[in-house]
Amino acid sequence: MGLMKEFMEFLKKYQVIGLAVAFIMGAAASSLITALVNDFIMPIIALVTPSGDWKGWQVILSKGADGTVTNAIKYGDFLGVLINFIIVAFVIFMIVKMIMKEDATAKR
């Protein structure tokens, strides 16, 4: 039973369970925010862009003999991922700020 006791002490000391819960919640929140961005925010952005398909924006570097694009820099897709990252980071910032504010008031 010594190994099991050491393992349980490890879990408690390094708060592994809390870390696992935070990781799972973060993954779920990330999925939720990605859906918010893709299903609500990106269509609004598409309405105000001239072509509407801004995620397909690219700089064509080369084409094949049949005219198909063989090499391109897809900066529209990158912009979509960047917007998603900024929104996820902002939401996490607001959650941490709210938690730290509650923690600071509890210590007084």
Image (cartoon, helix red, strand yellow):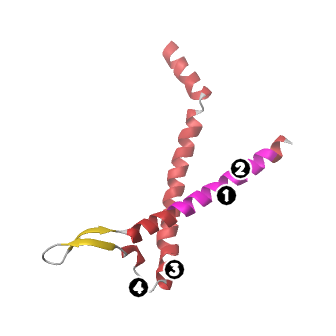
Magenta segment, prevailing SS (helix, strand or loop): helix
Spatial CA span between label 4 and label 1 = 34 Å
User: If you read the primary sequence from the N terminus, does the residue marked by circle 2 or circle 3 appear first?
Assistant: 3
**Type of residue at label 4?**
Ser
Q: Residue lying at the far bottom in this picture: please name it.
A: 50
Q: Residue lying at the far front in this picture: please name it.
A: 61
User: If you read the primary sequence from the N terminus, does the residue marked by circle 4 or circle 3 appear first?
Assistant: 3
From which residue to which does the magenta span run? 85-104
Kind of element beneath mark 4: loop
* 12 lies above or below 45: above
Tell us which disc is closer to us: 1 or 2. Answer: 1
**Type of residue at label 3?**
Ile
Label annotation for residue 99: 2
Residue nearest the viewer, comparing 3 with 33:
33
**Residue depicted at x 57% and y 45%:** 22
**Which residue does the numbered mark 4 point to in the structure image?**
51
Tell us which disc is closer to us: 2 or 3. Answer: 3
User: Tag 3: Cα neighbours inside 10 Å, few (<14), some, or many (≥20)?
Assistant: few
Kind of element beneath mark 3: helix
Residue nearest the viewer, comparing 82 with 28:
82
Tag 1–tag 2 contact (CB < 8 Å): no
